[in-house]
Image (spheres, rainbow, N blue to C red):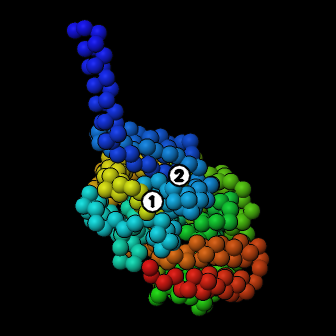
Amino acid sequence: MNDTTKRTLAATLVAAWGCTAQAQTVVTVWVHAGPGPEAVAYAAAAQAFNQQNKDIRLELTKLPEGSYSDQVNAAALARKLPCVLDFDGPNVYNYAWTRKIIPLDGFAELATARADMLPSLQRQGSYNGKLFSVGQFDSGLAVWGNRKLLQAAAVRIPTKLDEAWSLDEFNAALKKLKQSGVPTPLDMKFNYGVGEWFSYGFSPIVQSLGGDLINRNGFKTASGSINGEAAIKAMTMLQGWVKAGYVNAATKDDADFVKGRAALSYVGHWTYRDYKKALGDDLVLIPAPKFGAKAVTGAGSWNFGISADCKNPAAAAKVLAHLMTPAEILRVTEANGAVPGTNAALALSKDYGPNGALRLYVDQIQHKVALVRPETPAYPAVSTAFAEAVNNIVAGADVKKELDRAAKRIDQAIEDNNGYPTK
């Protein structure tokens, strides 16, 4: 082969490679994940997809949670959203209403994942009769207990849904624990600060008593719900726990429970590993109490959707289908400790399977104890108003005045957006 032939062959190969590269569809994906196991899991998921698919390349960008929503909003204004993005559960309705994301119903690749998703995630991902997001994982809210301290105070320890404490028994337990020498019996994670935790964690107390943050019949007003009788009772009760010294509202870290300064920790699944390391066999998972006629617990978590800016949504749907396989769900939930989001993944999970240590969270979801946050584009306004009211109430402010103010703020947001009409 002479030099001219070699050069011609080389040029042909380069051109062929260039055509192949140009034919490959790029799907950009944003996830909220700083340094840590979850970020590693997503990087591995991207690598696995790219190894399995030659016509589509997944390009992953990991962004810190603190600034994530701001970056999404900025990209939306510039029409430069990635093809696939994750977002916190209750944001799906506002994102769908503002057309940041598109419906997923028409993608055959996602049919299996949709049918197998937990009912709470199906509900979380739906708006106006259409599915806009799929979730790899759900969340769980319950009460962690220190068996040793509870037994020393002669407090009954429920472990099943039908054994849940009533309000009277819960209050009696706090009193017994305080009298037995536990400094602040109930940790409620006030160290998380004013934000979504207040809405996720404390609205179930309102809902257990029969109230809510907004009237879910049409989502047109918060008046009469967030400032209704049940909500006032719930927040008065929370304020009372703080005043009685049952709750340390000034706590700065997670040490109250692990150091034995609290015997109960009202929080989610995400503390399990640290708590288990600290307490060992003394750690017990207790179902959400029945503060009212029924127990209610929080549900929902970060989930994925396809942006309206995506040039090739069919390719993006294939990426989502990959992320929703049992293997990828288990990869990320083993990293972040969350509830696997499909029945297939649950069946393979050590912690959340039929005999898993965290199965109670699944039972709460499957028996409809778990309730997703209000499915309305107004949710960001709802959550902000409620969180600020809770913060002021815990500091000693008048309960009714704070909740009335929250109702007015939410109703004003609804009015400013013409009732969030369906687009």
On screen, residue 34 above or below 14: below
Residue at x 55%, y 77% (from the top left corner): 378
Furthest residue to the right? 396
SS category of the residue bearing label 1: loop
Q: Nearer the viewer, residue 80 or 116?
A: 80
Point out the tag, 2 or 1, that comes first from the N-terminus. Answer: 2
Quarter of the image for the C terminus: give it: bottom left
Q: Nearer the viewer, mark 2 or mark 1?
A: 1
| Residue at the spot of label 1 | 309
Whole-percent x and y of residue 295? 47, 77
Residue at x 59%, y 91% (from the top left corner): 224
| Residue at the spot of label 2 | 32
Mark 1, residues whose alpha carbon is within 10 Å: few (<14), some, or many (≥20)?
many
Quarter of the image for the N terminus: give it: top left
Furthest residue to the front? 4
Residue at x 60%, y 86% (from the top left corner): 415
Answer with left or right where residue 375 lies relative to residue 341. right
Q: Nearer the viewer, residue 314 or 90?
A: 314
Q: Nearer the viewer, residue 95 or 355?
A: 95
Quadrant hosting residue 229: bottom right
Whole-percent x and y of residue 10? 30, 20
Q: Does the rendering let one see residue 264?
A: no
Mark 2, residues whose alpha carbon is within 10 Å: few (<14), some, or many (≥20)?
many
Q: Nearer the viewer, residue 333 or 271?
A: 333
On screen, residue 390 above or below 210: above
